[in-house]
Image (spheres, coloured by chain):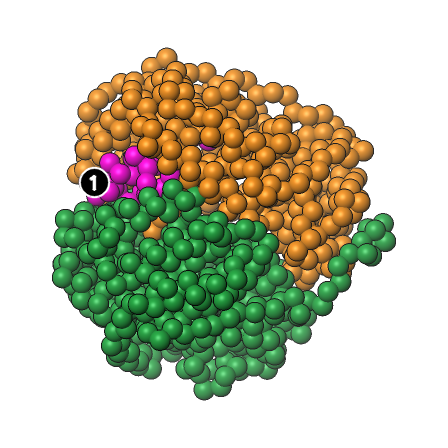
Chain colours: A orange, B green
Amino acid sequence: MPINRRLMALLSGLLLLLAGLAVQATPRIETWETSKGARVLFVAAPDLPMLDARIVFQAGSARDNGQSGLASLTADLLDQGAGEWDADAIAERLEAVGAELGIEAQRDMASVSLRTLTRQAAMDPALETLAAVIARPRFAASEFERVRANVLIGLNRDEQDPGTLGKKAIYRLIFGDHPYAADPAGTPESVAALSRDDLARFHARHYVARNAVIALVGALTRVEAEAIAEYLTSGLAKGESAPALPPVQDSPSGALERISFPSTQTHIYAGQPGMTRTDPDYFPLYVGNHILGGSGLVSLLMEEVREKRGLSYSVYSYFLPMAERGPFLAGLSTKNDQGQQAREVLMDTIERFRAQGPTQEELAAAIKNITGGFPLRIAGNGKIAQYLAMIGFYNLPVDYLDRFNERVEAVTATAIRDAFQRRIDPARFTIVIVGPDGTALAGREP
Amino acid sequence: MKLRLIFAALLMLPLTKLASASQVQERILDNGFKVLVKEDHRAPIVTSQVWYKVGSSYEHGGLTGISHVLEHMMFKGTEKLAPGEFSRIIAENGGDENAFTGRDYTAYFQTMAADRLPISFELEAQRMRYLTLPEEEFLKELEVVKEERRLRTEDDPESLAFEQFNAAAYEASPYRIPIIGWASDLEGLRVADLRDWYHQWYAPNNATLVVVGDVNPQAVFALAEEHFGPLSAEKVSEPKRRAEPTQRGEKRIRIKAPAKEPYLLMGYKATAIGHAGEEWEPYALEMLASVLDGGSSARLSRELVRGSRVAASAGASFSAFSRLPGMLLLDGIPAKGRDVDELEQAILTQIQRISEEPVAEAELERIRTQLIAAKVYERDSVHAQARQIGSLETVGLGWRLMDEYVDHLSRVTPAQVQAVARKYLIPDNLTVAVLDPQPIEGKGPAPASPGGHARAHQ
């Protein structure tokens, strides 16, 4: 059980991993639509005899429509019985050929990903199972009850983790009435109220071809990839793309919430609505945040909070760009009697960066890091498949990868300062503090 | 089905051939530094990893956690580099870097564009012999590590339970030591202790360099000679042997911590490669763990989560590749309306079944297929390949095992799985720990004193 010292520190870097790309050796993306209307993005990768297939639907929790946890539970049930196979048979069919299936619902998207060998004896049954899982899940009552009961246990376990409690709370406060406010897993009450018919309806509406994007990376020809995409969507209804989500509103003033928890550390989260995946300020905000709190050990927040003062193991800031404005979040955790000091350093650093912007040196270093790291980010079929799904899902241009580095290089210090001053307002931040009562006494009340 | 016709033309290479083409090249420099290189030209990148033979299992009472603190300090300055400069240089060159400490190793890596390899070598060679360990940096970094311990252990009830379970299970084996160290040992650590630890273990003859990526092995050897060749070797003694005495009866502990759900941990003392009576035993134990938990079709998911529904989740794991004998571990969370006793009984029933009836050939075949597929998937990441090579080398088994272990596992028979179950998975070898959740709401602050969790087990 190795200790990965940067795991927490790199959190923000990972969340924005999908952003950093450049011109060198960019994979050649081919794109088309299946006859049912699903968009396909394909990269031929002949070196290894394997396929990564990733199907994403606009079927995340933002579509829960008041039934919090619906999208997530629907995704959880997909492989627990589909077509002619029960849960045991699905697991057996995939694992008997060494295939791996992953299913997850976040706020914007539900994703189903398969990794398999391209040997016919492996790939045929793996794809056949995948097609059934997305198109013909059974939602059997007994499996529904079992999975729901286990989701409720997971939600209960979340409440023993102060970090998770704080993160759920800050989303609730930042997003208010917007569907992004709810945690994708839902609440014990909302999950208890769901029925298997709710799931079947949700599936019928959202797991449809026109609401899907298929990413394929592997040892396939274009002809083979077309046949696979056609086959995977053959069982889906054409359906319709999901409607646009409502825009995220700014809160007129900030908010502060304290959550009492008997922990040895106080967790502090600060944030506000951030940016969309297609935001006109995307690049200045992305590069700016990389300097502020997105570049692990060399970020300004890490320098001020950890390197200079030893206050926290992990400290970060990130934008999570989504279909509508996802959050800008910053956070740390520190022993209880340092909560106030750490919070001040965190806020002062953000405010100073907003006021002054980066130095030329900081900007140059960040651009070199982002553009120089480009080959790493696309090294591997699995990574490329994630990019393809992201490009397809958010309707980014197909040359997004090719042009990423030049856009990063075009960002100026002035543009960053300007974008941060227009878009980030610490005076209206939402702040959540989790820790024992009385340890994180108020400093600056909003 | 239509698919069959369409895919008839796809690649049909024999899997075993794909799985075994590792082609590692080895060179040992005059100072004892071992360099292992594997070419992978799929992308213009390289990962470079330095693995030291030191970790928490080399530590002793009073100094626990020192290997991990030293890992943090490796970023805090050398004779030529200011604190933090290492990371800034790597970042400016577009690199990903990280480090990790385990029981049997401490490793440092950079992944970068292939042409930046000289930068990685220059910096790693610096900190192998010329770390400065400034006291003021140490004092700050020690606070960071204490925060890491609070975050990942003190405030995480399952992690806390695991730490105490481990310390209860092992009597003399240094595997009882938590990697991050006991809280009071961290309090007592001094920079002089780190200096001694650094000089004792950080030397070219106690380290292995692993390079995987778009490189030419001969050029890598030359570059390694240039940067690491001039470093002086150190007299490195093997750590003293601290063999675990035979366990004489089941052990049970209960861990009370603020939590919402109970958690069950069970461990049977087992063996490891190089320690077993029969060479196949550790491999049979790995296969046994996969029969129980090699995916969602394995027995724990099928029987306990989906079948009897006694578990919300249940897992099993065993690693044949450790320096010292470890445990076969089982863990789980009871399903709603069930309790840890029922879950434990259900797991024991599964253990008994393996002891009493031979595993079906089809189950072993499924696991073999998964192993071979995983070897192919592993090649999608240069980092994963290097990590495999580095860890095998550093625990003392040698990188060649990388090519052989799938064969070793594939040769395991149902009778051998049964034999290791009967030999090792017996009550006298068992430790059981239960997390006993204490109320979270309405309680005041938890005891936060640094020595609060330093209580070792009898």
Front residue of A369 and A160? A369
Residue that lies at the very extreme toward the top in this rendered image = A252
Where residue A77 sits, quadrant-wise, is top right
For the N terminus of chain A, the image quarter is: bottom left
Residue holding disc 1: A308
Magenta region: which residues?
A: A293-322
For the C terminus of chain A, the image quarter is: top left
Q: Position of residue A413 (x, y in %)?
A: 37, 24
Front residue of A258 and A175? A175
Q: Position of residue B446 (x, y in %)?
A: 22, 45
Q: Does residue B258 appear anywhere in the picture?
A: no
Residue at image position (82%, 57%) is B8
Front residue of B35 and A246? B35
Residue that lies at the very extreme toward the bottom in this rendered image = B277
Q: Secondary structure at mark 1?
A: loop
Residue B70 horizontal side relative to residue B135, left or right: right
Q: Position of residue A338 (x, y in %)?
A: 18, 37
Q: Does residue A205 appear anywhere in the picture?
A: yes
Residue at image position (33%, 28%) is A360
Residue A361 horizontal side relative to residue B452, left or right: right
**Magenta stretch containing residue A301, yes or no?**
yes
Amino acid residing under circle 1: Lys
Where residue B381 sits, quadrant-wise, is bottom right
Residue at image position (50%, 47%) is A376
**Magenta stretch containing residue B348, yes or no?**
no
Tell me if mark 1 has few (under 14), some (14-19) or many (20+) residues whose alpha carbon lies within 10 angstroms of its own.
few
